[in-house]
């Protein structure tokens, strides 16, 4: 089974802090994604990556950046955390071999910014 | 662009009742369709998928059939259990790298 591991389940940070959310997948997937999930707003794509060192903006990239130095790891960075970034963050990966490939999700990181 | 519409719920059923969660889609190409389930405090798990018209995806007693003529992919289960209480997401994947998700339907099953 594909395993996508997010480093923290719960995180509490202060406004203005730099925050790193880490995600690792073990299936050699080319594509990786970061979503945030908020009540009433569903899943919204922040950034995605086709391959190592490649990144593309999603629907809501403002206030975030990403890093993909190794194929298995995709990091989401909040440069200066704000209270409106309090949310559930979900990482996912997907094989690029076929358009039929599903997304595989981690268990999520619930981030609270105070 | 592509889009997915699903009933938002919440849906409340008694144990052993029949479940239907409606999902319709709009797509310009020939997408694959997916149902994901999210249990409290967890990420999304793939429940089932269908990759072409008339395909039926099934898993854990859940089924959905890819209907191109009605652009639908409704989720069904003949007899729900309390353990099926979760949020269900319909999703569409196309040749591009991104997925499109519906808003999710919260299901509560009462004993």
Image: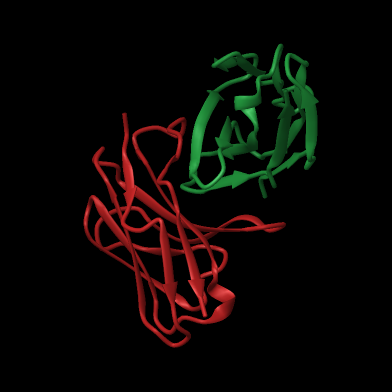
Chain colours: A red, B green
Image x and y of residue A48, in percent: 42, 58
Image point (59%, 76%), residue name? A84
Q: Can residue B97 be seen? A: yes
Seen in the picture, residue B60 relative to A72 is either above or below; the reply is above
Percent across and percent down for residue A80 are 43, 84
The residue at 63%/16% (across/down) is B63
Counting every numbered tag in the picture gives 0
**Nearer to us in this view, A10 or B103:** A10
Please identify the quadrant where the N terminus of chain A is shown: top left
Residue B92 sits in which quadrant?
A: top right
In the rendered structure, the answer to whether residue A107 lies left or right of residue B105 reads left
- Residue at the farthest bottom position: A16
Identify which residue, B103 or B11, lies in the foreground.
B11
The quadrant holding residue B79 is: top right
Q: Where is residue A25 drawn, in percent x and y?
A: 28, 45
Residue furthest toward the left?
A70
Q: Residue at x 54, y 73 (%)?
A: A85
Give the camera-side residue of A73 and A29.
A73
Which of A34 and B52 lies nearest the eye of the viewer?
A: A34
Q: Residue at x 74, y 32 (%)?
A: B23
Look at the picture and state if A67 lies above or below B74: below
The single residue placed furthest to the front in the displayed view is: B111
Left or right for B37, reference B73:
left
**Residue B32 in view of the camera:** no
Image position of A78 (left or right of B32): left
The x and y percentages for residue B98 are 51, 48
């Amino acid at each position: 089974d594909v395993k996508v591991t997010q480093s923290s389940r719960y995180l509490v940070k202060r406004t203005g802090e730099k925050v790193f959310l880490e995600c690792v997948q073990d299936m050699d997937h080319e594509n990786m994604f970061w979503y945030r999930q908020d009540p009433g707003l569903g899943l919204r794509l922040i950034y995605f990556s086709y391959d190592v060192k490649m990144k593309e903006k999603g629907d809501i990239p403002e206030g975030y950046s990403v890093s993909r130095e190794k194929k298995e790891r995709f990091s989401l960075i909040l440069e200066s955390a704000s209270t409106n970034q309090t949310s559930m963050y979900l990482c996912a990966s997907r094989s690029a071999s076929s358009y039929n490939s599903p997304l595989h999700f981690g268990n999520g990181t619930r981030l609270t910014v105070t | 662009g592509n889009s997915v519409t699903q009933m938002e719920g919440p849906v409340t059923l008694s144990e052993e009742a029949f479940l239907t969660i409606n999902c319709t889609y709009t797509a310009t190409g020939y997408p694959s369709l997916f149902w994901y389930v999210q249990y409290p405090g967890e990420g999304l798990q793939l429940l089932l998928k269908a990759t072409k018209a008339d395909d039926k995806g099934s898993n854990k007693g859940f089924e959905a059939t890819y209907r191109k003529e009605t652009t639908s992919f409704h989720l069904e289960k003949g007899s729900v259990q309390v353990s099926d209480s979760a949020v269900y997401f319909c999703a569409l994947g196309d040749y591009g790298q991104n997925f499109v998700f519906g808003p999710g339907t919260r299901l509560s099953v009462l004993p």
